[in-house]
Every structure is written in C-alpha cells, then in structure tokens.
Image (cartoon, rainbow, N blue to C red):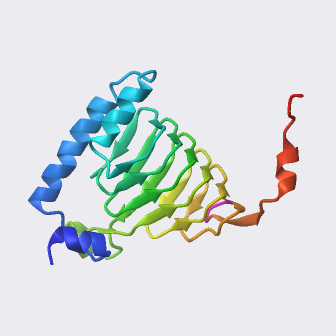
Amino acid sequence: MTENEKQEAGYLYRPSPEMEAHRFKIQDAIDDYNKLKPSAVKERAEFLKGILGKVGKNVNILPPFKCDYGYHIELGDNFFANYNFIVLDGNYVRIGDNVWIAPNVGIYAAGHPFDREERINGLEYAFPVTIGDNVWIGGGVSIIGGVTIGKDSIIGAGSVVIRDIPEGVLAAGNPCRVIRKLTPEDKDKYIHAE
C-alpha cells in the first residue's frame, strides 16, 4: 500500500516525497490565489477549478485561503467561504450545495498521533469530512476529521465539531452539541421588510 493509499484509507502514513512535492506545488498556487483581488470573483473561481478536486457553480472563497493538497476538496454549487478559510485536506473534504462559511473557520481532516514516538517520526493520519447541503458554519469554528454535518444545520460561532451533527439542527459549543431542532418559527426571528 502506498503512503497516499494509507492516507486516504485513514491509516497512519508518512508523506512520500511525491506527496510533499504536490503539497508545496498547491501551497505555492494558493499563494498566487491569495494575491488576486477580492473583486476578482470569476477569476478566483476559475483558479480553484485548476487546483481543487471539484468546484461547483457560483463558488467564492475570499482570500486568504489555505489548503494542503487541493484534490481532496470538493465544493458544491453556491458555496461561500469568508476570510481565513483553512482546509487541511489529507483526506476528502466534501461540501454540499448552498454552504456558507464565516471567517476564521478550519477544517482539519489531517492530524498527528497521540503517541509521541509516532508523532516525532513524522507519522500523520487523515479522516474525511462531509458537510451536507444548506449548512451555515459560524465564525471561528473548528471541524475535526471524521465528522459529518447533516444538511440544513447551523454550527454556532466558536464551536469545535468533534462528532457527527444530524441534519436540521442548531449545534454549538466546545465540544459542539445539538442545541435544538430548527423549526419554521426560526424565520420569525428576523424583521422582514414589507
């Protein structure tokens, strides 16, 4: 089994020279991406199509943006990420349609083992992350590898998501937990102009 196959299967792996070279290539490309003007929405979307695994229609990630490999990231239609979006995509990060991400959000599919010898010896692990359609992620949220966030859910600002979140709920906290189901009455929370 290659190191890349181990990585995608969720086993401990040591990045191969080819993996490291690709990571530097993508990080250099992301550096160029971050130099594009915020108003260059179409140019940035086209740029992302060249480095990410999948890019839907109407995608906008405001700079600065950071990622490791790129090809593990799949974005659905009508995706928006605000400033300082970080994706450590050692494994697949699949994000559905109509997902909005506030500033300073990190998705950390990759990590290091608890055992100090394995960690010192450069071993890593990576677990996939899935975010369903119509999800809103609040500012300063951290999403840890191996997590699925169900469609139509909201993750409150500052949350640390370490386990799956079901669909249609408001969840928040550290660790993130379900606060309540979202209801039609939530629409009445805001004042609508006539």
Q: Is residue 123 visible?
A: yes
Q: Is residue 65 left or right of residue 135?
A: left
Q: Looking at this view, name the residue that lies furthest to the left.
A: 17
Q: Nearer the viewer, residue 94 or 88?
A: 94
Specify whether residue 107 is painted magenta.
no
Q: Nearer the viewer, residue 76 or 12?
A: 76
Name the residue at 51% across, 47% down.
105
The magenta region covers 171-175
Above or below, 113 against 109 in this view is below
Name the residue at 41% across, 23% down.
40
Q: Is residue 13 visible?
A: no
Q: Is residue 85 left or right of residue 52?
A: right
Name the residue at 71% across, 63% down.
169
Q: Is residue 172 left or right of residue 66?
A: right
Above or below, 7 against 151 in this view is below
Q: Which image quarter holds the C terminus?
A: top right
Query: Can you give x and y, in whole percent of width and height, for residue 131 in the image?
Result: 52, 60
Q: Nearer the viewer, residue 93 or 79?
A: 79
Query: Can you give x and y, in whole percent of width and height, for residue 80 in the image?
Result: 52, 40
Q: Is residue 76 left or right of residue 113?
A: right
